[in-house]
Image (cartoon, rainbow, N blue to C red):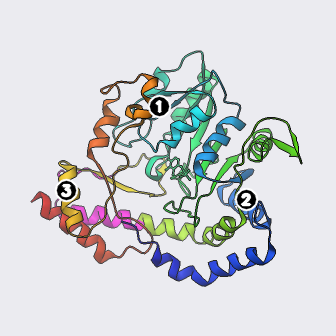
Amino acid sequence: MLDFSREYQLRREEILAALELVADSQKFILGPEVEQFEAAAAAALQVKHAIGCASGTDALWLALAAAGVGPGDEVITTPFSFFASTSAILRAGAIPVFADIDPVTFNLSPAAAEAVITPRTKAILPVHLYGQPVDWDHFQQIADRHKLLLIEDAAQAWGARWKQIPAGSLGASAAFSFYPTKNLAAMGDAGMVTTNDDTVADHARALRTHGMRQRYFHDEIGWNARLDSFQAAVLNVRLKYVTAGNEERAQIAENYLHLFQQAGLIGAITLPEMLTNAHSAWHQYVIRAPRRNDLRTHLTAHQIGTEIYYPLPIHLQPSLSHLGYMAGTFPHSEQAAHEVLALPIFPGLRMDEQELVVQRIAEFYF
Ligand SMILES: *Cc1c(COP(=O)(O)O)cnc(C)c1O
């Protein structure tokens, strides 16, 4: 499914040299590497501020809290994402409100989101799932109409663009994750908040260090959500190669399309579909497959790794039963959870390996 040792072998010397510099400097927390990474990341994303933090989950909480989302506020989001998209809303003290996805893109449906707006709605938190940006124009219209904040979960979307505008620079604030499987990957946990708003940026910086602007004076209750210098050093190296890596991912997606066409599999399975204005980061290549679990067993038996993102929608998670959502409430999300299968896609994946994936899938259906 994922073999990052291929990329690591290419960058090993450069990464170890960067780590050695951190060790020698003894500046481990928010050191010069962090500042360097924040500046380079902001430039790459064409955004005014980038604030490094400890994880994507912390980035989501910071993006919400720094933009002013708090107790009593409702935040509309998708039930078909990683759990953190929702748990961060709860951690900010707000109330998650779900709306169903668009079955074509797997992303939060703008129309469904608009339908659950109440006077208490403060923000919409769409997720650029699998690397495909959400229908931003539509969300922007809704946000303008109802005076709401838009906050992006861009954890899977480094390098994605909506009409040439980078994901992470579209909303009031945005959250990135650099978890080791993400397109831009740390060697541990790391994340980042981005914003074009000076006040939100200042707030996020304070919140990530216990609400301190001046040492040991706590303006408000924050948390320790800092990025450490070792992770920033790794990210500084990999930032140079992430665009090439994303281009390789796009090529792999195109290869799959041709291979599935040649194999006559279009119709047997459903391939990913992109909106006209969406430039995907191709974090995942996700198909809809009939008899998905049996197909997965077949592929596993032939040493082909796959993954299910996500097998149980968030509104049905046991820990969130107090929110009161029942099975059947979001049919598109629930159906997707039964049908999606992520196939191998990562820089370094070879054409002969892709051919084998498609051949094994054809074998299963024909
Ligand atoms: C990875 C991910 C997160 C959480 O990031 P961590 O760095 O693991 O905390 C949040 N949302 C989405 C959509 C993700 O894919």
What numbered label is drawn on residue 110? 1
Q: Is residue 262 among the parts visible in the rendering?
A: no
- Tell me the quadrant of the picture where the N terminus can be found: bottom left
Mark 3 lies on a secondary structure that is helix
**Residue 217 vertical placement versus 352 (above, below):** above
What numbered label is drawn on residue 357? none
Q: Position of residue 56 (x, y in %)?
A: 59, 50
Give the residue type that dot 3 points to: Leu
Instruction: Check whether the beta carbons of the residues at disc 2 and disc 1 lie within 8 A of each other.
Output: no
| Extreme residue toward the left, this view | 366
* Nearer mark to the viewer, of 3 and 1: 3
Mark 1 lies on a secondary structure that is helix
What numbered label is drawn on residue 38? 2
Q: Is residue 115 among the parts visible in the rendering?
A: yes
- Tell me the quadrant of the picture where the C terminus can be found: bottom left
Mark 2 lies on a secondary structure that is helix
| Marker count (numbered) | 3
The mark nearer the N terminus, 2 or 1, is 2
- Residue 267 magenta: yes
Q: Position of residue 257 (x, y in %)?
A: 30, 61
| Extreme residue toward the bottom, this view | 13
**Residue 28 vertical placement versus 95 (above, below):** below
The picture quadrant where one finds residue 315 is top left
Q: Which residue is mark 3?
A: 295
Mark 3 surroundings: few (<14), some (14-19) or many (≥20) residues within 10 A: some
- Residue 224 magenta: no
Residue 126 is left or right of residue 258, and the answer is right
Residue 319 is left or right of residue 286, and the answer is right
Residue drawn at x 70%, y 61% is 228
Give the residue type that dot 2 points to: Glu
In front of the other: 284 or 20: 20
Q: State which region is magenta.
A: 251-272
